[in-house]
Image: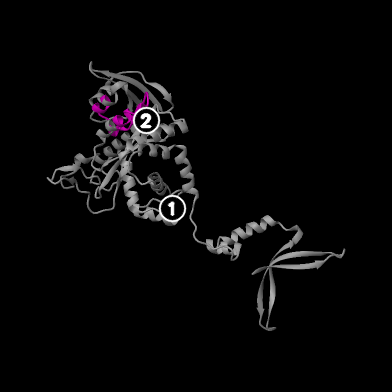
Amino acid sequence: MYLRRTQRRTKEGGAVGYLQLAHNVWDAPSKQSRVRVLYSFGREDQLDRQAIVRLIGSLQRALEPDEALSAAAGGELEFVASRPLGGAWALDGLWRILGIDRTLGRLLEGRRLDVRAERVLFAMVANRALEPLSKLAASKWVCERAWIDGLAELDEDACYRAMDWLLEIEAQLAEQVYFATADLLNLEVDLLFFDTTSTYFEREQPDPDILDEDGDVIAPAFRVYGHSKDHRPDLPQVVIGMAVTRTGIPVRVWSWPGNTNDQELIRQVKDDLRSWKLGRVVWVADRGFQSAENRRYLQRAGGHYVIGEKLRGNSKEAKAALSRQGRYHDVAGNLRVKEVVIDDGTMRDRFVVCHNPEEALRDKAVRQALLDQLSDAIAGSDRLSATS
């Protein structure tokens, strides 16, 4: 297949060229090759060159990168390798806008480090965002399948060393990155939503505790059995927590051993963020963190909170709030609320009791249907014998 040019004479005596897409076909009876025109592009001086460019680009999709380069440049260039650049380039730009490179340089200053420490950490972040792999596979990804500016080569040992450095400065780095992000996106941190989840690992045994020479526990196991929110109690897991703003922008992420009790976590989270001096913050959490101890802890130093409460739980405060008389105020067509303050002279709790009239009517109808069904089932049962 090739581009064929023909020429015709005009009435004025000039010449006009025509372009055609053609290929040669063998004509067996005449024992010679004949030209077959597949498509005519029309007059050469009236050619839609942009259409030709689009056609060539479309045809190049069927070629390997080296074949496409050779077809366009002939023998002048030799194809060596091809790596995607866009994703890593965009992430590197954001990395520098947030000042993470400068922050890492400042926090790691004075340590005997690899001069590429910041680039190695960025490479692992980029790999996690673009194509999550293990440390060993990530080093191959950098060397073979991606382009990281300033990091031509990477080995597994460099990744592990960089992780050790990162753990030493994790808290300070997280704070600096948060404030840079808050300034860039103009974040409002008057509300902080916190929740946890769990994720499991496909392995047969949980991690063992780390012991010293005397057999004492230095560090508890991390991937262990616990209450699985993925409904996989047969596999070891970890617990992950995240605090986000009202618009869903993450503020900080935590991870704990898989058997950690949710009730204790929000206290640690509040302590970890205290040094960030976020100002007046209202903590928002679901009923999994509801306890009198947590409420008191969040109230320290003028703190505020909004925590869900189970309607028919074992909380004596919630039972007291439900038993109090009070007028409901309509908020929406399907929502009424009333405020109840429980003050025992030592502690003061403010409850907002929510009532959905539409849901109440549905619940009443369901209860009545169940009663009718039971009434029909037991009707006349007194006349049945013991063996009927």
* Residue 307 visible in image: no
Q: Nearer the viewer, residue 224 or 60?
A: 60
Residue 330's quadrant in the figure?
top left
Question: What segment is highlighted magenta in the picture?
Answer: 269-296
> Disc number at residue 152?
1
Task: Tell me the crowding category of disc 2: few under 14, some 14 to 19, or many 20 or more residues within 10 angstroms, Cα based.
Answer: many
State which quadrant residue 257 falls in.
Answer: top left
Secondary-structure class at tag 1: loop
What kind of residue is marked 2?
A: Leu
Reply above or below: 12 against 221. Answer: below
8 with respect to 115 (left or right): right
Whether residue 273 is in magenta: the answer is yes
Image: 119 above or below 186:
below
Q: CA distance from mark 2 to mark 1?
A: 41 Å
User: Which residue is denoted by mark 2 in the rendering?
Assistant: 192
For the residues labelled 2 and 1, say whether their Cβ atoms are less than 8 Å apart.
no
Q: Mark 2 or mark 1: which is in front?
A: 1
Residue at screen point 76% across, 59% down: 45
Residue type beneath disc 1: Ala
Give me the residue at 35% from left, 21% from top: 338
- In the image, 9: left or right of 136? right
